[in-house]
Image (cartoon, coloured by chain):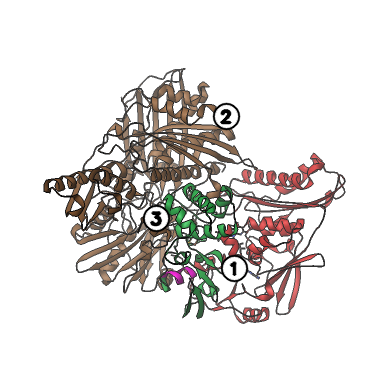
């Protein structure tokens, strides 16, 4: 059945829908304090039974020199509210929940490190480190040119919960020496590799199968403690073990995004030409950092020159440990942060010089390929900006508007794999970056059909499965259309070649080919995003977004429906993130939002209509010409919305969400 | 305790624990896994079913409270193998991404269209104000519901 | 995941049976629609020895209008208020408040009685019922008593209902012709607690105010509260009166900084919405 039709009839198969004979249900007892020494834990499986450390894997994975590794169950002390401390199980899920209530955790109070200021001032949160500085980077070079004017500001994006509508979940079943895992994930490979590293099992002994995945937005890219514990319990009992995260757990202990501070200074000429950028990026990575968290400050800093020709830049970028849930990637993962920082500064400069913000952007947009002092290479952007300002009607809009212009860098690093198998008159495809159905099947069918000439109806995209395709990377960082698309393209070419050699019609033969495409970032893959927003005040004088228009460059559009849907989804997210969406922590480090609505996920009646103009700003240098799109709405939307809100309220927007800065 | 229910036009009589939630009764006891659990606090509408003809959030109800009622889940919202007009419209425009929200939205929208002949966009948004879709920004779904409203029943 | 604890459950056939059950148990817990009750069970905020479901009690059903007075059974669902044919100004005010409750699905589940009894400062019906001067008919083993809703709430989530009592019905007179009404709810995040809800009713004779009632709820106040406005009777309202009402309203502000805004923001919102209310119901006079 067609993908949409299956779901629309309620026939999806998500992890929570999987039931196996003799299944056990796991529940996790969690820390009710943000920081404390463990005195005793009574009941359940504890660190003394399951003494594992979380293996690093997932988005941004690399061989980490991580000073602090997270125990899967807290050992001597707890470092964040909601940290797993013990696990219980039962064949009845209600009874498992009863059991978790009986676990007694006694801790000795330690003063939690909640804010970035505290992280800098207070002693380290882990005994094995000497300061809360988890990583530090210097980018660019010091410079002296101060231009004619300087503007300076401090900008902050609050933590945001990813909140896919389906929470995390896993079924683990260890049988005959093989750990079988069904999971809601962005990458069966990072789950396999992460479980392997955590449990000390060889990769070949782990099979990971993706269930229908109800959204992810970054939070399902890596291995988590609960997955390791569930697998351990299955190994111990020989029975399948299921764990489904509650929304409450998701809000306190999954990996949230953002938590980013930028202290920046722009120097410019009187005419608005930016001559230099300096400052500091500080990221709150929570209690434990994987490679992605540790590298995030540098990754954000590197993008800061955006689509602009800024000759000088000098940035310090640091990550700090705090007593909060470990940070993860979220819709854009570092891109919206960079976009917000740079674009807010350009607006400030425009105000200082009394020049239209769009004019300042035009003045600085690159006119040819430009290598930034931070090491970023972007193609000419000015023409795109000019077209966009015209097409979106920016020049004719009223005063309460905002414009932003930024880049979207796809995470092509690591490349991607794809397998095509032709058999019995059907073409089956597997992607290394498994679809959690940003409608990957649409572009996969299109590419395979175009290359092989086989009609789309014979082509099926399967869910991620480490058995069917042994190596792969994952779905994140607006990468799939580019890297997975390229791998599929390559495999399809190969299949075509095989058939031609045999002189056969492709669909009547039997062929199988797995392609692994390595890729490195090429400026042609970077998309430009122009977003224009207008805002209003409601009856009580609170700001609301009236309209939002995206003029985004997607290269060769592989599937317009899916691209538009992803962009409107990202723009909706950007609106709530600017206005009211966040997770906040009280003085004791306890997360305050306890329901998905309290975290500020937006509803239909709170949003305006979006206009999406898909522009082809030139094809990328890939076989199919596509660019990234997944996270465009959030990256492009944030600063444009923030500016419109600023114009309508007359108050400079420094801190997101705005409805909190009233505090 | 004993309960008697009619689910998707079939009678069911059985013994349930008084604490069993209606959503778990449907999913675990009857195997109707098209009804989802997204938030557990009545905020997202993933668990929406029709109870005596009106949509409710089945995560906030005990199965015992529904004793004697008539329930329609996503599996029974369109008669037979086909799709109703909301389902068809969403299917045609491919308005979904992950689809986790779909069951609840289809039920809420179907009920709404039965009571509202000629809705405008803001009516549709209001009607969906108990359902979260995290992927699409709602626009494709709202458009699909509006299109469905134009179709003759 | 959140699942309720082991419970015993009864669905009595009559109020008197319900009252007996209440009296026979040490930790009984009533549910009507159960939207908050079941949620609190799931969160294990309570461990009752009996859950008594009064949601279907016939005696608690029905909306009647007799002798210029409405009687609304406590187990009437929120949607029944909205769908009702009554349309006097007083009932219209209640309808507006009812259509502000949660979302269409929650309105199919929740009851009027539940809404009144929770005592969450941000519930929608209490400010409307305060403005309407509603009497609560409360039944207990010894008989029934009437209590004006203005003395019902004694703190957030606390009211004057005894452990073994049931709210039977809510009664109020239709203020009738010549009254104008207003209801507005201001929230930041949908389905989260509101910042401020204001309900108002007024009658203006010629240029003089004959009657003005304004009630405030929301996270900006401690409990849903009426503003003292009896002094305005017979006065021709002007800017001064408006400012005085706004000031009286803002004095009700529970000025705490929290997720719903800073103390200053909340005060500002109370003032703004009260002003909207005043201008809307007193209207043309100013
Ligand atoms: C996500 C969400 C959003 C919500 N949004 C709103 C909102 O916007 N506005 C709003 O006003 N409310 C809101 N609510 C709260 C609630 O759903 C409604 O107030 C509803 O009307 C409560 O009625 P109920 O019958 O479901 O109450 P129940 O859960 O059955 O009962 C609530 C409480 O009242 C007691 N009780 C109920 N009936 C009686 C009685 N007759 N006598 C004595 N005690 C009784 C119960 O013991 C219980 O303590 C929301 C709830 C949720 C879960
Ligand atoms: S799961 Fe029931 S409303 Fe979200
Ligand atoms: S499509 Fe994913 S939540 Fe709606």
Q: Residue at x 42, y 73 (%)?
A: B30
Q: Position of residue A29 (x, y in %)?
A: 40, 64
Give A438 or C224, whichever is nearer the viewer.
A438
Dominant SS type (magenta) = helix
Q: Position of residue A473 (x, y in %)?
A: 26, 48
Determine whether the beta carbon of the residue marked 1 sits less than 8 angstroms from the nearest atom of ligand 1. yes
- Chain A, which colour? brown
How far apart are the two marked residues, 2 and 3, measured between alpha carbons? 42 Å
In the displayed structure, does residue A166 sit left or right of residue C26? left
Q: Chain of mark 2?
A: A
Q: Chain of mark 1?
A: C
For the residues carrying marks 1 and 3, which lies nearer the camera in this image?
3
The secondary element bearing badge 1 is classed as loop
Give A444 or C117, whichever is nearer the viewer.
A444
In the displayed structure, does residue A292 sit left or right of residue C117? left
Chain drawn in green = B
Identify residue for label 1. Answer: C33
How far apart are the two marked residues, 1 and 3, measured between alpha carbons? 34 Å
Chain drawn in red = C
Q: Residues within 10 Å of mark 1 (few under 14, many from 20)?
A: many
Q: Which mark is residue A399?
A: 2
Q: Chain of mark 3?
A: A
Q: Which mark is residue A4?
A: 3
How far apart are the two marked residues, 2 and 1, measured between alpha carbons? 48 Å
Determine whether the beta carbon of the residue marked 2 sits less than 8 angstroms from the nearest atom of ligand 1. no
The secondary element bearing badge 3 is classed as helix
Q: Position of residue A617 (x, y in %)?
A: 36, 31
Q: Quadrant of residue A304?
A: top left
């Amino acid at each position: 059945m067609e993908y949409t039709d299956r779901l629309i009839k309620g026939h999806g198969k998500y992890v929570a829908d999987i039931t196996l004979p003799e299944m056990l249900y796991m529940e996790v007892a969690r820390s009710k304090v943000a920081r404390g020494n463990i005195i005793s834990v009574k009941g359940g499986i504890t660190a003394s039974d399951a003494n594992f450390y979380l293996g690093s894997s997932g988005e941004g994975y690399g061989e980490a020199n991580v000073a602090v590794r997270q125990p899967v169950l807290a050992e001597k002390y707890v470092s964040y509210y909601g940290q797993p401390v013990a696990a219980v199980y039962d064949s009845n899920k209600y009874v498992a929940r009863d059991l978790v209530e009986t676990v007694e955790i006694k801790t000795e109070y330690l003063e939690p490190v909640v804010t970035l200021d505290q992280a800098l001032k207070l002693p380290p949160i882990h005994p094995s480190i000497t300061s809360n500085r988890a990583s530090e980077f210097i980018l660019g070079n010091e410079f002296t040119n101060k231009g004619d004017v300087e503007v300076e500001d401090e900008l902050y994006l609050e933590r945001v919960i990813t909140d896919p509508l389906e929470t995390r979940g896993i079924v683990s079943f260890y049988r005959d020496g093989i750990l079988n895992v069904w999971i809601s994930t962005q990458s069966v490979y990072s789950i396999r590799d992460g479980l392997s590293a955590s449990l000390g099992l060889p990769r070949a002994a782990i099979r990971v199968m993706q269930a229908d995945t109800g959204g992810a937005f970054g939070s399902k890219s890596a291995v988590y403690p609960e997955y390791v514990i569930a697998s351990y319990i299955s190994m111990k009992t020989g029975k399948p073990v299921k764990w489904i995260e509650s929304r409450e757990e998701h809000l306190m202990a999954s990996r949230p995004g953002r938590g980013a501070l930028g202290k920046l200074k722009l120097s410019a000429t009187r005419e608005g030409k930016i001559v230099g950028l300096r400052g500091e990026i500080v990221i709150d990575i929570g209690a434990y950092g994987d490679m992605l968290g540790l590298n995030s400050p540098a990754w954000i800093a590197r993008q800061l020159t955006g689509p602009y020709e800024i000759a000088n830049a000098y940035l310090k970028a640091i990550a700090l440990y705090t007593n909060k849930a470990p940070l993860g990637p979220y819709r854009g993962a570092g891109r919206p942060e960079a976009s917000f920082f740079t674009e807010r500064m350009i607006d400030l400069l425009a105000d200082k010089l009394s020049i239209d913000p769009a004019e300042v952007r035009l003045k600085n947009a690159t006119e040819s390929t430009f290598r930034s002092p931070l090491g970023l290479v972007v193609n000419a952007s000015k023409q795109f900006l000019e077209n966009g300002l015209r097409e979106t009607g920016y020049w004719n809009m009223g005063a309460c508007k905002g414009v932003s212009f930024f880049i979207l860098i796809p995470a092509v690093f690591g490349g991607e794999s794809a397998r095509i198998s032709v058999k019995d008159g059907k073409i089956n495809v597997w992607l290394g970056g498994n679809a959690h159905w940003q409608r990957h099947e649409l572009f996969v069918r299109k590419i395979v059909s175009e290359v092989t000439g086989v009609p789309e109806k014979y082509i099926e995209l399967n869910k991620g499965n480490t058995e069917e395709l042994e190596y792969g990377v994952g779905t994140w960082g607006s990468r799939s259309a580019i890297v997975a698309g390229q791998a599929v393209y390559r495999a399809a070419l190969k299949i075509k070649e095989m058939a031609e050699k045999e002189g056969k019609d492709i669909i009547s033969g039997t062929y199988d080919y797995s392609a692994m495409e390595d890729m490195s970032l090429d400026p042609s893959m970077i998309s430009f995003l122009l977003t224009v927003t207008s805002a209003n005040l409601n009856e009580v004088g609170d700001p609301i977004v009236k309209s939002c228009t995206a003029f985004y460059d997607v290269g060769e559009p592989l599937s317009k429906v899916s691209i538009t849907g992803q962009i409107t989804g990202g723009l909706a997210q950007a609106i709530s993130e600017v206005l009211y969406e966040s997770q906040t922590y009280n003085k004791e480090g306890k997360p305050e939002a306890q329901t998905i609505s309290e975290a500020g996920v937006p509803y239909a009646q709170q949003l305006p209509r979006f206009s999406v103009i898909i522009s082809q700003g030139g094809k990328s240098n890939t076989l199919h010409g596509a660019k990234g799109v997944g996270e465009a709405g959030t990256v492009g939307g944030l600063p444009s919305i923030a500016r419109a809100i600023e114009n309508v309220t007359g108050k400079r927007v420094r801190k997101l969400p705005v409805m909190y800065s009233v505090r | 305790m004993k309960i008697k229910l009619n689910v998707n036009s079939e009678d069911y009589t059985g013994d349930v624990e008084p604490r069993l939630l209606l959503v778990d009764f449907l999913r675990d006891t009857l195997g109707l896994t098209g009804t989802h659990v997204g938030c557990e606090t009545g905020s997202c509408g993933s668990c929406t079913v029709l109870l005596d003809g009106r949509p409710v959030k089945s995560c906030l109800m005990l199965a015992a409270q529904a004793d004697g009622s008539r329930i329609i889940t996503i599996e029974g919202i369109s008669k037979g193998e086909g799709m109703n007009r909301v389902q068809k419209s969403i299917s045609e425009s491919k308005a979904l991404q992950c689809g986790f929200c779909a069951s609840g939205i289809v039920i809420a929208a179907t009920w709404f269209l039965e009571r509202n002949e000629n809705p405008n966009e803001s009516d549709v948004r209001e009607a969906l104000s108990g359902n979260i879709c995290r992927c699409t920004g709602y626009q494709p779904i709202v458009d699909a519901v509006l299109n469905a409203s134009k179709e003759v029943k | 995941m959140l699942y309720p604890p082991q419970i015993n459950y009864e669905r009595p056939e009559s109020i008197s049976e319900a009252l007996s059950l209440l009296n026979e148990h040490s930790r009984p817990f009533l549910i009507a629609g159960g939207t908050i009750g079941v949620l609190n069970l799931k969160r294990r905020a309570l461990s009752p020895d009996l859950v008594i479901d009064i949601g279907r009690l016939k005696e608690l059903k029905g909306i009647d209008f007799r002798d210029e007075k409405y009687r609304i059974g406590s187990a009437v669902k929120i949607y029944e208020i909205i769908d009702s044919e009554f349309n006097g100004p007083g009932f219209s005010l209640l309808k507006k408040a009812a259509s502000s409750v949660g979302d269409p699905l929650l309105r199919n589940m929740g009851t009027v009685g539940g809404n009144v009894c929770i005592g969450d400062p941000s519930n929608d019906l209490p400010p409307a019922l305060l403005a309407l001067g509603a009497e609560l008919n409360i039944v207990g083993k010894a008989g029934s008593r009437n209590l004006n809703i203005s003395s019902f709430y004694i703190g957030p989530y606390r009211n004057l209902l005894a452990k073994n009592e049931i709210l039977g019905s809510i009664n109020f007179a239709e203020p009738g012709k010549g009254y104008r009404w207003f209801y507005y709810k201001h929230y930041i995040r949908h389905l989260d607690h509101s910042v401020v809800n204001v309900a108002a009713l007024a009658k203006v004779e010629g240029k003089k105010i004959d009657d003005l009632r304004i009630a405030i709820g929301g996270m900006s106040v401690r409990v849903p509260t009426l503003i003292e406005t009896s002094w305005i009777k017979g006065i021709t309202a002007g800017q001064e009166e408006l400012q005085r009402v706004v000031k009286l309203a803002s004095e009700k502000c529970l000025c705490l900084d929290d997720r719903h805004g800073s103390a200053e923001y909340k005060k500002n919102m109370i003032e703004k919405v009260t002003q909207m209310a005043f201008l809307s119901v007193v209207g043309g006079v100013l």
